[in-house]
Each structure stands twice: as C-alpha cells, then as structure tokens.
Amino acid sequence: MTADGTPRPPFVRWWRQGGAFLVAIALGLAMLWAGGTPVFGGLRYERSTIAAGELWRLVSGNLVHASGQHLLVNLAGLALLSLLFPGEYSRREWSQIALASALAVAAGLWWGSPEVEWYVGLSGVLHGVLAAGAIAWWRSHLRWMAIVLTAILVVKLAGEQLFGAIGWSGDLNVIVDAHLYGAVGGTLAGALVSSRRRHVATGLPPGASGPV
C-alpha cells in the first residue's frame, strides 16, 4: 500500500516483490546469448573441458542458450514461475534454490549421464524452481494446488524419461535428464529452506521438535 493506504497497482507490487530482479536476470541471459559463439563456447557445460579444469562450466552452462528460440522458451518459463510463486521465498532463498538446482544438474549429468558431452540452458534450473515452489505450497494452506502441481511435475518427468521430450519442444535437442536432476535439486533445496524457515518461526533449532 501507499502512504495514504491506497493499494499499489498490480505492476508496482510485482516489481517490488521481485519483478525488477526477474527483469535483470532476463536481460543478463539475453546479453549472454547476444555474445554469440565465443560466449556460448566458453560457458557451456562441456564434459571434456570440465575434466581439464574449467569448473565454472558446471554452473555457467545453465546461463547460455543454443538459439533465440531456446532462450525465449526458457524466459517464458521463468515468467510463468514468477507469476505462480510471487512470494513463496525471498530473493536470497530463490537464488539459493536456483544455485542448488544448477549444481544438481551438473552433478547429475557428470555422474548419471556421462554420455552427454555438452549441455546448455536454464530448463533444468526451472524444473528445480518449480519443485521448490511445490514444496512451499505443501507447507502452506495451498495443499490442493500442491497436489495438482506435484502430479503434473511427476507425470512430466516420468513421461520424458520413458518417451523423451514433449512434442512442443520443436527443433530443440532437449536433454530431459537435466530436468530430472534439476527437479531433485530444487526439491531438496526447497525442503531445506522451508524447514529452516519453520525453525526460525518457532524458535527451535533444526532437528528439534515442539511441545508434545
């Protein structure tokens, strides 16, 4: 609300609740894509160069995209998630969840999918964000929405593992394993952040229980 008690316009509320942060992320991703082949080649997850010591690629591979279509699809997903979960976590917590999801993607590809030589894109992280959002809904009064969202996510991930990428992926060569690994990382990070919030709210240390 404003100083005189008048509700702020929806756009202003969205901007203050994280819209500015979202726009900054989108612009950053667009600038990396505009950097072309040198940026793409220097930042993508690439198994052989990671093995040679270029460890930044474990995270930076999530930030570059193979084409404008690839970038737009992921930006659309990012915008949708910002509308679904406008206040479930703070910007710091979302950043922690995104980083955990990115590292889960990298770890999963490295140990679970060694046949993948290179990978780019934010989709694995977006699946982690979606999973963390579902965790937040499970811990709130939105249980029925959490059930629906969890069911959709589980069916999507299972379908991709069984049948490959969904039909509207177009010409994109989708690494569906990254979606699974990102969702696992987001689930764990979301559960950890939510648990920490609960303990802070109750004044109990992690692992302790309340009165019986």
Image (tube, rainbow, N blue to C red):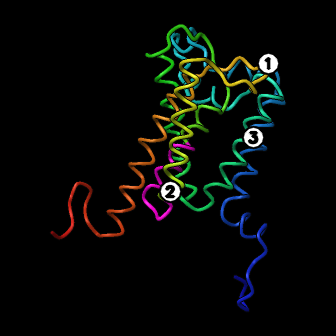
Residue designated by label 3 = 75
Q: Range of the magenta residues?
A: 129-142
Quarter holding residue 59: top right
Q: Nearer the viewer, mark 2 or mark 3?
A: 2
Q: CA distance from mark 3 to mark 1?
A: 17 Å
Mark earlier in primary sequence (2, 3): 3
Q: Amino acid at mark 1?
A: Asp
Secondary structure of the residue carrying numbered label 3:
helix
Mark earlier in primary sequence (3, 1): 3
Q: Which of the labelled discs sits on residue 171, or is there none?
A: 1
Residue 3: x %, y % from top left:
71, 88
Residue 78: x %, y % from top left:
69, 44
- Identify which residue is drawn at 76% across, 70% down: 10
Prevailing secondary structure class for the magenta stretch in the rendered image: helix
Quarter holding residue 204: bottom left
Cβ atoms under marks 2 and 3 closer than 8 Å: no
